[in-house]
Image: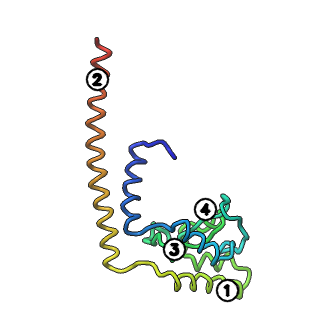
Amino acid sequence: MPAATPAYVKNMIRRGLSEIVDPSPSSEEEKIIWSHFQDCCAYCGRQMRRGSKEAHIDHLVPASAGGANGIGNRVLSCALCNAEEKRDQPWEEFLKSKARSPEEFAMRRQRILDWQKDHPTLTGPDHQKLIKLAFEKAGEICGLFDRSANEIRRRARALHRTNIGS
């Protein structure tokens, strides 16, 4: 675990509240992802070993573009495709660039579409309202955290000055 800096703590508050509304896949759900994609990268087809650093559970639609954390928006991906190449490209466009033939593209695309059909993600205005509420509450908590941290810093500096002066 990284050092518990104020920035890290605030990030964990935000993530923790958003996980209530839009949870990441559980370890059991990750096993289902591995099984559906037959231990292969959904994009390039590379075979991977479970638990290896080369294997990622990728967002089809990136979180930065409003993509959900649920398993219907997650696929198995190799590190090269996920971390180096795909970035924020639309997944179908990226998949097309990775497939060696139209038939391979169609097969991999259908596997992803079947996955999404079998594992729909929560969407819609009510879900978006809950996500917005989670971020607003996280902002309130982070504001309280900042005010408390500043008060503690002031007191620590005052105590430090007092101890040095005596």
Q: Decide which of tag 4 and tag 1 comes sooner along the chain.
A: 4
Q: Which residue is mark 3?
A: 71
Q: Decide which of tag 4 and tag 2 comes sooner along the chain.
A: 4
Asked if disc 3 and disc 4 are in contact, CB closer than 8 Å, the reply is no
Asked if disc 4 and disc 1 are in contact, CB closer than 8 Å, the reply is no
Disc 3 secondary structure class: helix
Q: Is residue 136 above or below residue 127?
A: above
Q: CA distance from mark 4 to mark 1?
A: 23 Å
Q: Is residue 30 above or below residue 5?
A: below
Q: Which mark is residue 159?
A: 2
Q: CA distance from mark 3 to mark 1?
A: 20 Å
**Number of marks in the image?**
4
Disc 4 secondary structure class: helix
Q: Nearer the viewer, mark 3 or mark 2?
A: 3
Q: Which residue is mark 1?
A: 107
Q: Which mark is residue 83?
A: 4
Disc 1 marks a residue whose amino acid type is Met
Q: Is residue 131 above or below residue 122?
A: above
Q: Nearer the viewer, mark 4 or mark 1?
A: 1
Quadrant location of residue 125? Answer: bottom left
Disc 4 marks a residue whose amino acid type is Ala
Q: Nearer the viewer, mark 4 or mark 2?
A: 2
Q: Decide which of tag 1 and tag 2 comes sooner along the chain.
A: 1
Which residue is at a point 45% across and 70% down the rendered structure image?
A: 65
Q: CA distance from mark 4 to mark 2?
A: 46 Å
Dot 1 crowding, Cα within 10 Å, few <14, some 14–19, many 20+: few
Q: Closer to the camera, 95 or 110?
A: 110
The spot of residue 138 in percent (x, y) is 32, 57
Disc 2 secondary structure class: helix
The spot of residue 72 in percent (x, y) is 51, 77
Q: Closer to the camera, 39 or 73?
A: 39
